[in-house]
Amino acid sequence: MKLRYKGKTKDVYELDNGNYLLRFKDDVTGENGVFDPGANTVGLTMEGAGRAGLRLTRYFFERLRDKGIPTHYVNADMEENTMIVKPAAVFGKGLEVICRYRAVGSFLRRYGMYAEEGQPLHAFVEVTLKDDQRQDPPITEDALDMLGILSKEEYAILKQLTQQIAQTVQEELARKEIELYDIKLEFGRLEDGEIVLIDEISGGNMRACRNGEYIEPLDLERIMME
């Protein structure tokens, strides 16, 4: 297999059959040693985070498959910390789509003049560009269309899928009396043009709390899998 990309939290390899292999690492995003799913830098390394992220990702992707929600997932190998996925092209140079249920993190930093910390948000969807140099700037539907990154029709599909996926995760967490505050997702186009969820769904790309207390990614995996 051929190494195609070394990412912050996983490396990507191309397989001979055209599929891709994702190898999960123990690095998570954050700043100054503090985990933050919305950060654009690796903030810390947590032993076991890669396997924990893969276990949750497999769990959630299989729930989505049961619901008929499209993803790039094929299968996972827990011993190797790897996941096989179908090839998908990202939008532009990559987008991140965040669904928010509480005003925390970067949302609160931007809109703190009007928002109170922790106030409820109704599955608010925002899109940011994957651009470390410019600190992942938010971008609107109109700008995505005008810049040729994503058409308005595709944006509508992206938003609908984001809210469906976030609701599925929210429902699964609620089984363990855990509340989803926000989740960061990525999407791409398959060879036939279908828009699908890509990357992962794990404690490393969401904020989840119980009784108002944040749950660390490794603890979230343990609670969900016990």
Image (cartoon, helix red, strand yellow):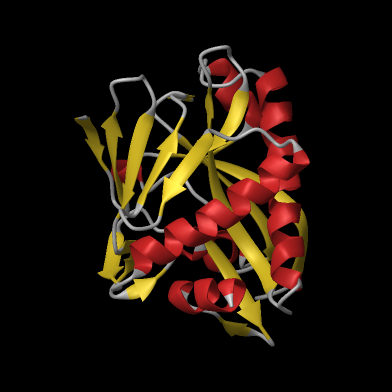
Q: Is residue 58 above or below residue 221?
A: above
As drawn, the residue found furthest toward the top would be 192
Q: What count of labels does the image hold?
A: 0
State which quarter of the image contains the N terminus: top left
Which image quarter: residue 3?
Answer: top left
49 on left or right of 217: left
Q: Where is residue 203? Give x, y as percent.
A: 50, 65
Q: Residue at x 51, y 14 (%)?
A: 191
Which residue shows up at 29% across the image and 26% down it? Answer: 15
> At which x and y percent is residue 79?
33, 58
* Residue 37 visible in image: no
Asked whether residue 88 is in view, the answer is yes
- Position in image of residue 73 (x %, y %): 52, 38
- Residue at (52%, 54%) from the top-left corner? 57
In this rendering, the answer to whether 127 lies above or below 150 is below
Q: Nearer the viewer, residue 188 or 224?
A: 224
Residue 129 against residue 201 in the figure, above or below:
above
Q: Would you place residue 197 above or below residue 24 in this image? A: above
Residue 63 coordinates in the image, percent (x, y):
68, 50
Q: Which picture quadrant has residue 46?
A: bottom left
> Residue at position x 69%, y 52% from top?
166
Horizontal side of 121 relative to 215 (left or right) equals right
- Quarter containing the C terminus: bottom right
